[in-house]
Amino acid sequence: MRLTIGLLLALLYSLQLTAKDGYKITIKLTDRKDSMLYLAHYYGKPFPTIYKSDSTRMDKNGVAVFTNSEKTTGGIYMILSHDLKSYFEFLLNNGDDLTATAAMDDLPKSVAFKGSPLNNDFKAYQEFLVNFSKEQQGYQSALAKATTKADSATIHKQITKAGEELKEYRRKYVASHGGNLLASIFNALELPEIPEGVHHTEDGKVDSNYGYRYYKAHYWDGFNFQDDRLIHTPILQSRLDEYFNRLVYNPDTAIENADMILSKMRGSEHLFRYTLNWLSTNAQTSKIMGMDKLFVHLVGNYYMKGDASWLSDEDLAKYIDRAKKIAPNLIDNPAPELQAVDVELNPKSLYDYNAKYTLLIFYSPDCGHCIKEIPQIDSLYRAELKAKGMRVWAFNVDKEELKWREFIKKHKLEEWQHIWDPKNASKYWAKYDVQTTPSIYLLDEEKIIKGKKLDVSTIAKALEIAELKKKK
């Protein structure tokens, strides 16, 4: 049966009328009136980090209506009272027209939705979580009172069983509700379950790293990288944090994994943007040594190739400038040459300084951290580092010669090679990204950087890692 052109056009027009962007949210509060209400949402981070996106005023009957005709990215939203203390969450999709009634003094029990089966499901889940939380509190209280191992073991089994029931609740919902927003959230919350039993390597040995590798390999299995609505949930940052700060242990693996995730997020405006920003910031602040290599990689392969279109030219230039300052002194790069003078004012070159390992320290006699840490480093040097073939090249960044010489004498640092560059001819700050002092690098006998941004608590560990890599 053929449709006439007129009928087809009418059908298309009717579909356009029903597929509206934005939202209409009608709120009826039974215990508030004539005051402001706010519409807010998450943005990658958990509560209390939320963002207000709309506001309106309730009438004398406690009714407020939020309307917007622009395309809206769905997710978990919330209604906030005027004092920003009371709130309730709900699920929102682009084009939604929904109604909710509530008493702000009786949340979340009092919330009821009309015309939104999805939010009825969400409320049922929230009620399940309330009961689950009460149950867990009871188990924790019982554990604190347990007097025998048998009692504790029984309670732990109950805790495990309750956790399995929570997972099963989510899985059953996903199985029966396809790809709706709540199902997507449940999938994003799913974490890998390591298969039980003893696992072996190909040569028959017990594989002690199987659990770690399995968990990491399947960590993102349930996360829909193309569902931008997940940005308006409190899930993404916690997942990124666990993955890159607990499961990834070296810069090269971080680069590989970052590329994998970003490639899957291409086309998802908000997820891609948030993740690229997060990765860039985390790479510069990570406690994992050498992770700034990831930052340089991201700038060169994303920012400089137009993938951060939301940045102004000025902000983009800052990223590029920062990467250029870091790039020369990445782990496993040859250390940039330094030329200055020693305490006798004789010229010295870093590459003429022969040692199995060189601890390169940029410091100032006036720096409070230096005054505290330099003597500690010397104690460590005398106690164990010297015997392992390490020598110290101490670069004074201060311009006052007398203070420098008094500092060396006071702390008995005569065994160190002391260097001074009062005219800043070496441009040490640019070559080694010296923004604070002390700034400490570990170099091997070929002057390859093996550690950076170290302190007295990490020098020995960095040396140990360098030795292990050398043996391999």
Image (cartoon, rainbow, N blue to C red):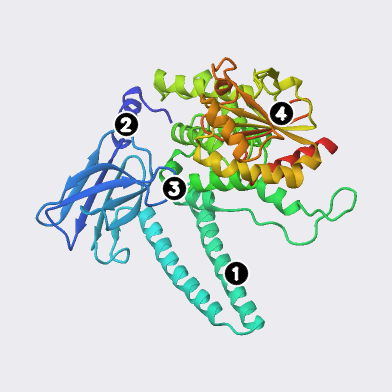
Q: Residue at x 90, y 49 (%)?
A: 203
Q: Where residue 469 sits: x, y (%)?
A: 79, 37
What kind of element bears circle 1? helix
Tell me which label, 3 or 4, sits earlier in the chain: 3
Whether residue 220 is visible: no
Tell me which label, 2 or 3, sits earlier in the chain: 2
Q: Rate crowding at label 2 as few (under 14), some (14 to 19) or many (20 or more) other CA atoms within 10 Å.
A: few
* Quarter assignment of residue 131: bottom left
**In the rendered image, which residue does mark 4 sit on?**
332
* Disc number for residue 181: 3
* Disc number for residue 19: none
Q: Amino acid at mark 4?
A: Asp
Q: Nearer the viewer, residue 171 or 109?
A: 109
Tell me which label, 1 or 3, sits earlier in the chain: 1
Q: Nearer the viewer, residue 279 or 103?
A: 279
Tell me which label, 4 or 1, sits earlier in the chain: 1
* Disc number for residue 16: 2
What kind of element bears circle 4? loop
Q: Nearer the viewer, residue 346 or 310?
A: 346
Tell me which label, 1 or 2, sits earlier in the chain: 2
**In the rendered image, which residue does mark 1 sit on?**
160
